[in-house]
DNA sequence: CTCGCCACCTGGGGGC
DNA sequence: TGCCCCCAGGTGGCGA
């Protein structure tokens, strides 16, 4: 999926076109997402959207008396399209606003569309989530506290949503490169200074990716169908064997927690 | 608690 | 063309 920047770019893209507008219909072509799309989602017509929020990689469409929770999984995109535009094979759900519709396309069907009545932050999928890396609550001191007592590799901890949300496989590698830290380093061995550098790196990488409009990963497209250009800016992700742009050492690929990790053996210690 | 691993699903690319 | 294998953005849930 889309990691935090892609979700945020989607949020920024769709909010202006749905805020204050009534949902006129919900079309579910295939309810077999990560969890079945329930009847409650199908009966949202008439509710007015108050705004679109985000918690980690979850989009939260405020419908007044509840929220539509949308997750893009690994391959999802949410775009505003003409409601009459023919739906493709993987266009599973439309939230219709008159002549236009928010269309969820998700080839792998790891995404989700759920209805949450009441306090959305108490929802079982959100209640356990960790700190927002772009919020004022996240800095070196906080990261240092989070890492204490965890001997797991720092890369795995960065991707653990119970501690820090939004940092996925790509930006975890990129952040560690920017901070000059080896991904295998046990989390609780990082000094306060290195935690400060890493926290700055995480925020910087996520911000840069949002500014660039998200990454152009395979089928990721933003809310208006545009492709982001951050992929060109990858320093290590997907560059195994290619020279580091700074020191020319070949970028290495290793596997951590069954996911690929990329790092520069020269720049990261 | 923490940790490592699995599963869910489809499609694209490379090698033969 | 076809087949087979590997790889891919996430994350809840399981057992150790």
Image (tube, coloured by chain):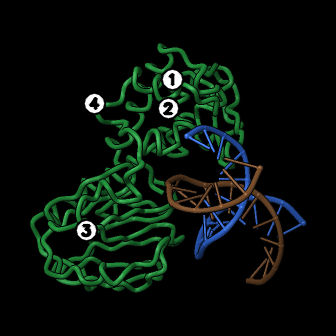
Chain colours: A green, B blue, C brown
Label at residue A136: 4
- Residue assigned mark 2: A175
* Residue A228 shows in this picture: no
Chain letter for the residue marked with disc 4 in the picture:
A
The image's mark for residue A117 is 3
Marks 4 and 2 belong to one chain = yes
Badge 2 and badge 3 in a common chain: yes
- Nearer the N terminus, badge 2 or badge 3? 3
Q: Does the CB distance between marks 3 and 4 fall below 8 Å?
A: no
Q: Residue visible at 39% across and 41% down?
A: A209
- On the image, the x and y values in percent for residue A98 come to 15, 81
Q: List the residue tagged with mark 1.
A: A179
Look at the picture and state if B13 lies above or below A141.
below
Q: Secondary structure at mark 1?
A: helix
C-beta proximity under 8 Å, tags 2 and 3: no
Q: Is residue A210 visible?
A: yes
Image quadrant of residue A88? bottom left
């Amino acid at each position: 999926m889309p990691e935090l920047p892609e979700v945020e770019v989607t949020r920024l893209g769709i909010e202006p076109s749905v805020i204050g507008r009534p949902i006129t219909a919900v079309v579910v072509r295939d309810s077999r997402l990560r969890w079945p799309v329930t009847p409650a989602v199908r009966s949202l017509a008439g509710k007015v959207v108050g705004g679109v929020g985000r918690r980690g990689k979850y989009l939260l469409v405020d419908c007044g008396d509840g929220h539509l929770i949308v997750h893009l999984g690994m391959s999802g995109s949410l775009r505003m399209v003409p409601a009459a535009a023919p739906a493709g094979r993987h266009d599973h759900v439309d939230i219709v606003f008159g002549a236009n519709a928010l269309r969820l396309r998700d080839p792998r069907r790891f995404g989700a569309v759920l209805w949450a009545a009441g306090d959305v932050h108490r929802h079982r999928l959100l209640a356990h989530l960790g700190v927002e890396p772009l919020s004022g609550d996240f800095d070196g001191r906080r990261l240092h506290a989070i890492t204490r007592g965890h001997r797991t590799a720092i890369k795995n901890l960065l991707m653990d949503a119970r501690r820090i949300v939004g940092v996925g496989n790509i930006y975890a590698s990129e952040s560690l490169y920017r901070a000059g830290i080896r991904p295998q380093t046990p989390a609780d061995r990082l000094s306060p200074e290195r935690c400060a550098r890493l926290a700055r790196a995480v925020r910087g990488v996520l911000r840069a990716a949002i500014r660039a409009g998200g990454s152009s990963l395979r089928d990721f497209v933003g809310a208006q169908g545009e492709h982001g250009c951050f992929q060109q800016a990858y320093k290590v992700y997907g560059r195994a064997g290619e020279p580091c742009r700074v020191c020319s050492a070949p970028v290495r690929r290793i596997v951590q927690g069954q996911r690929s990790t990329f790092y520069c053996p020269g720049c990261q210690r």
